[in-house]
Amino acid sequence: MMSIYQHYRPEEHEFVDRTVRWKAEVIERYSPKLTDFLDPREQEIVRNIVGNDAGIRLSMWGGSSYSERKRALIYPDYYEAGSNDYQLVYYDITYPSKFSTIEHRDVLGALMNIGVKRSKYGDILVQDHQVQFVCAEEISGFIEMNLTKIGKTGVKLKHIEEHELAVIEADYDERSGTVSSLRLDVIIAEIYKLSRSKVSPLIVQGRVKLNHKITEQTSVEVREGDEFSLRGFGRSKLIAIEGTTKKEKWRVRYGLLK
């Protein structure tokens, strides 16, 4: 098993084990397995492990080709997968937009307050006054019954069809820089133009996410393709590591989500 772990960070090993179990389950039972919603890093791990093995297939869907969070369907090659297999439900949130504003974090907070796990709903799409989200069919009844307020605003949920989902593309403002090392605190300081002495406590306080998971380790080494968020400063991505300079500094290209 060591050979599979060497490609992943220690905190990812538990998810790696879960993915290996899903794959074994599909092979043994010869029937499909639908996962909860996965973030982009988890999707990548599932792709790597399930891969293109003979006799087994993998597809992912979150409502549109722009979806960030998706459910994975692992299935035997005899099976014909259709969009109903993902068991997704789509909602438009109606609220008095003249008097109040609802942001992404407000929807997250409201769903958390009624006890819904993050793995049970997908993307939250906010565009001007339009607010939509995707959830797992098995929890839709519970959400409809309990999600009546977001903050202090009374809301109503309206079922919509997949094709009615707003299209919001991730758009990064790309920049380049040089860093002394690929440690998380160094990279975060470079991307958000802060001093390392300011960044380190923020990481320790749990205000930084690496690949959608809170990490409190300042010295963890980052990799190309890693995604970050710093609470209050937005989201970013390490697009490329472009080698070293003559002074042995790393040349990096990164993007801040617009």
Image (cartoon, grey):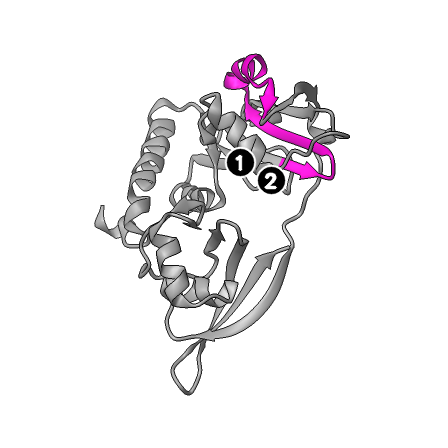
x 69%, y 19%: residue: 158
Q: Which residue lies furthest to the left in this view?
A: 2
Rate crowding at label 1 as few (under 14), some (14 to 19) or many (20 or more) other CA atoms within 10 Å: many
Rate crowding at label 2 as few (under 14), some (14 to 19) or many (20 or more) other CA atoms within 10 Å: many
Across and down, in percent, residue 100 comes to 70, 31
Q: Residue furthest bottom?
A: 246
Across and down, in percent, residue 247 comes to 40, 86
Badge count: 2
* Closer to us: 43 or 208: 208
Is residue 76 in view from this perspective? no
Q: Residue furthest right?
A: 98
Q: Answer yes or no: do the residues labelled 2 and 1 have beta carbons within 8 Å?
A: yes
Under circle 1, the secondary element is: strand
Across and down, in percent, residue 144 comes to 59, 15
x 60%, y 17%: residue: 148
Q: Which residue type does callout 1 highlight?
A: Lys
Question: Does 222 appear above or below 180?
Answer: above
Magenta residues span 125-150
Q: Is residue 222 left or right of residue 97?
A: left
Quarter of the image containing the N terminus?
top left
Q: Is residue 218 left or right of residue 107?
A: left
Q: Is residue 129 found inside the magenta-colored segment of the image?
A: yes
Q: Which residue type does callout 2 highlight?
A: Ser
Question: Does 7 appear above or below 53?
Answer: below
Q: Is residue 216 found inside the magenta-colored segment of the image?
A: no
| Residue identifier under label 2 | 67
